[in-house]
Structure formats: structure tokens, C-alpha cells
Amino acid sequence: MLAVIRYSVPAARTGEFLAQAHDIADTLAAQPGHIRGRVARSVDDSELWALVSEWEGAGFYRRALGAARMAMYPLMTLMINEPSAFEDVARA
């Protein structure tokens, strides 16, 4: 399962965002079911960022969000409100 949380980050907040995003990524990485994760920035829009993580399943991801809630709170105003969980789809 793939999780993508996107953020719109003004240039003036980039340093603050990056430090907090890496803290979130570290918190998520310590949770059961976490496979890998990273913080990424759009190559086309320097204010568009993503916290991307891969999980053994949606249940692991949902529980990890609860564990990371306090770390995520300061960045919630920058979060783009959209679905973040994506399941793998087998090739037909």
C-alpha cells in the first residue's frame, strides 16, 4: 500500500517544513508494517512537497497515522486535503 501526503509549503517555511517532515517520516518508519518512506519536492513547483511511504497494508498505515498525530499536527495547515492511501492494483 502506498501513502502520499502532499503539502503546499511557502518558500519562507521550507526549512521548518523539511525538519518537521523528516521527524514525521522517522516516526512513521518506527511503526509496524512500514516498508520505506521519503520526503520529496516537486521538480515543477518548488512549493509542492510530498511525504511518501509504503506499507504492508492499509491497517498498518492507519494505525501509524495515530502514532504520528502529534508530529504531524504542526504541518496540518500546509497539508493538501485529498485521499492519501493507494492500494496496489494487479495488471490485468
Image (tube, rainbow, N blue to C red):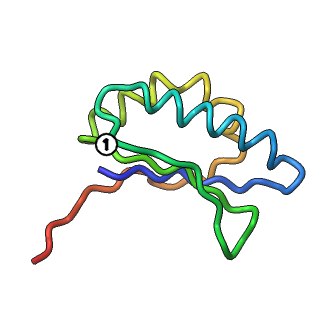
Does residue 28 appear to the left or right of 6 in the view shown? left
Residue 49: % across, % down: 64, 57
Nearer to me, 83 or 43 = 43
Residue 58 higher or lower than 11, as above or below: above
Residue 19: % across, % down: 72, 37
Residue at point 44%, 32% (across, down) = 29
Residue 48: % across, % down: 68, 62
Image-quadrant location for residue 17: top right
Residue at point 33%, 41% (across, down) = 35
Does residue 50 appear to the left or right of 33 in the view shown? right
Does residue 1 appear to the left or right of 6 in the view shown? left
Residue at point 36%, 27% (across, down) = 63
State the residue lying farthest toward the left.
Answer: 92
For the C terminus, the quadrant is: bottom left
Residue 53: % across, % down: 43, 47
Image-quadrant location for residue 91: bottom left
Q: Which residue is mark 1?
A: 55
Residue 34 higher or lower than 91, as above or below: above
Secondary structure of the residue carrying numbered label 1: strand
Image-quadrant location for residue 59: top left
- Figure label count: 1
Nearer to me, 78 or 90 = 90
Residue 50 higher or lower than 26, as above or below: below
Q: What's the amino acid at mark 1?
A: Trp
